[in-house]
Every structure is written in structure tokens, then in C-alpha cells.
Amino acid sequence: MNIQYRICGLNNKGGLEPLIEKDLHDLSQLIPISHAEVVLEKQTDAAPPFLVSALLAVPGPDIHAVACDHTLRAAWQKLSDEINKQFQHRVTHRALRRHDRDQFRMMDRQRTGAV
């Protein structure tokens, strides 16, 4: 997985790089992530000042999330939770679709008498 960072208004990533990489690696166990673009931004004229966004290139539609908070770490945690929720929804949706497809095939076989 390739992770690209864009940092605006910060001197460094605030020590978040290992946490970000760990969270993205954990998420890639559910759905493979080919590329991730993470934006860390401190807005001096906004409250809360820290804005974090991520765009993840995954099979199917890409996943995008944005979060803001008063600390960079809290903003990342909110974003991580949102991405995890989107991943879980996608995994569950795929499983339900697969289950429905199998149910339909079984009903079709029973209707036609095929075994």
C-alpha cells in the first residue's frame, strides 16, 4: 500500500505517521487498499483547528472521509472510526448480496427440479 501525505500548516505530522500506517494496515485486512492519500491540516482561522481527510483507493468505489477536532490525534481517531464504519458497511453489504444470490439460486433449482 502506498500512502501519500499532504501537510498544511503543521511543522510535522505530530507523531501520527505510525498510528496512521497501523490503522490503514488494519483496515486493509478487510478490503485491500492500493493507495491512500491523507491530508493533515491546521486551519488557524477555524474552530476546531485540525482537519484530517483521507481518500482510499480500494476495489469498487473509493472511500473518502473528513473529520475535524481540537487535536490532530482526536481528528484522526474520528476519521479512522468513520472509515472503519464505511469498510464494515461494504463488507456486510457484499456478504448480504452474496447470501441473497445463493438463496435465489437455491430457489431456482428447487423450482426447476435441478439438483
Image: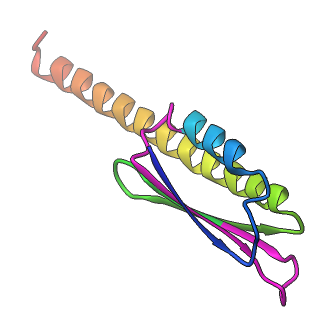
Q: Is residue 88 left or right of residue 67?
A: left
Using the image as rendered, state which of residue 112 and residue 33 is in the foreground: 33
Q: Residue 114, how many percent across, how many down?
A: 10, 14
How many numbered marks appear? 0
The residue that appears at 61% across and 51% down in the rendered structure is 83
Using the image as rendered, state which of residue 103 and residue 72 is in the foreground: 72
Position of 91 relative to 99 (above/below) = below
Q: Looking at the rendering, in which quadrant would you find the N terminus?
A: top left
Using the image as rendered, state which of residue 91 and residue 23 is in the foreground: 23
Residue sitting farthest toward the bottom: 45
Residue sitting farthest toward the top: 115
How has the structure been colored for display?
Answer: rainbow
Using the image as rendered, state which of residue 62 and residue 106 is in the foreground: 62
Position of 60 relative to 91 (above/below) = below
Residue sitting farthest toward the front: 11
Q: Residue 106, how many percent across, how many down?
A: 25, 21
Q: Residue 84, how many percent across, how many down?
A: 63, 45
Q: Residue 104 occupies which quadrant of the picture?
A: top left
Position of 47 relative to 40 (above/below) = below
Is residue 33 in the magenta section?
A: yes
The residue that appears at 29% across and 26% down in the rendered structure is 102
Q: Is residue 90 left or right of residue 82?
A: left
Q: Residue 51 occupies which quadrant of the picture?
A: bottom right
Is residue 32 in the magenta section?
A: yes
Q: Looking at the rendering, in which quadrant would you find the C terminus?
A: top left
Q: Is residue 109 left or right of residue 65?
A: left
The residue that appears at 76% across and 72% down in the rendered structure is 10
Q: Residue 109 occupies which quadrant of the picture?
A: top left
Task: Report the magenta residues as a range.
Answer: 28-52
Q: Residue 36, how many percent across, how many down?
A: 49, 55
